[in-house]
Amino acid sequence: MQPAVTQQRKQFFPVNDLFREYLHTFHRSLDLPVSYEDLLKYDDSFPLINKEGNDTLWQTLIYEQQFGRDVYEGLKRIYVQLRSGGDESILGNLYIDRVDFCTFGNTKPMRVR
């Protein structure tokens, strides 16, 4: 029998002042309207079940109504920055169906659909 292998979390390193200055100098820094911590401020969740009726180990998050609208709007603005270079004329065509949180694993990933 093989010994159990311990998985370790990835180390996170803060952005130091020199790198932050570099990003700002070359217009590569951006204040985001939503942070990961904002996504964690949900009121409730329920399990996401696949077509076969099996638990996917993802939880669909439920936010307080006004806060949820603000979070979804911020997520759409981030998408616009990533996909269309900031052209906000497409914001009216975007819709966020749900935000999911993975309960399995040590990185606590989120996904937006």
Image: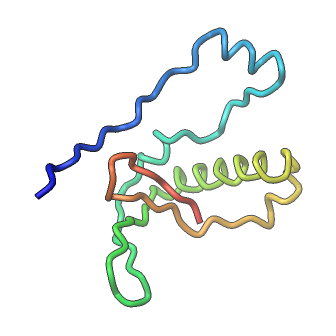
Question: Which image quarter: residue 53?
Answer: bottom left
Visual colour scheme: rainbow
- Say which quarter of the image contains residue 29: top right
Q: Position of residue 74 (x, y in %)?
A: 65, 47
- Residue furthest front as drawn: 1
In the displayed structure, would residue 71 be above or below residue 25? below
Q: Residue at x 81, y 15 (%)?
A: 25
Residue at 83 percent across and 21 percent down: it is: 26
Would residue 105 appear left or right of 2 to someone viewing this image? right
In which quadrant of the rendered image does the C terminus lie? Answer: bottom right
Residue 78 picture location, percent across and down: 70, 47
Residue lying at the far top of the rendered structure: 18
- Residue 83 versus residue 6: which sits nearer the camera? 6
- Residue 18 vertical position relative to residue 49 in the rendered view, above or below: above
Query: How many labels were placed on the picture?
Result: 0
Front residue of this view, candidates 63 and 104: 104
The structure residue drawn at horizontal position 45% and vertical position 52%, both measured from the top left corner, is 109
Q: Quadrant of the N terminus?
A: bottom left
Residue 31, position in %: x, y? 68, 30
At 74% across and 64% down in the image, what residue appears? Answer: 94
Horizontal side, residue 44 vs residue 109: left or right: left
Outermost bottom residue: 52
- Looking at the image, is 56 positioned above or below residue 105? below
Answer with left or right where residue 44 lies relative to residue 17.
left
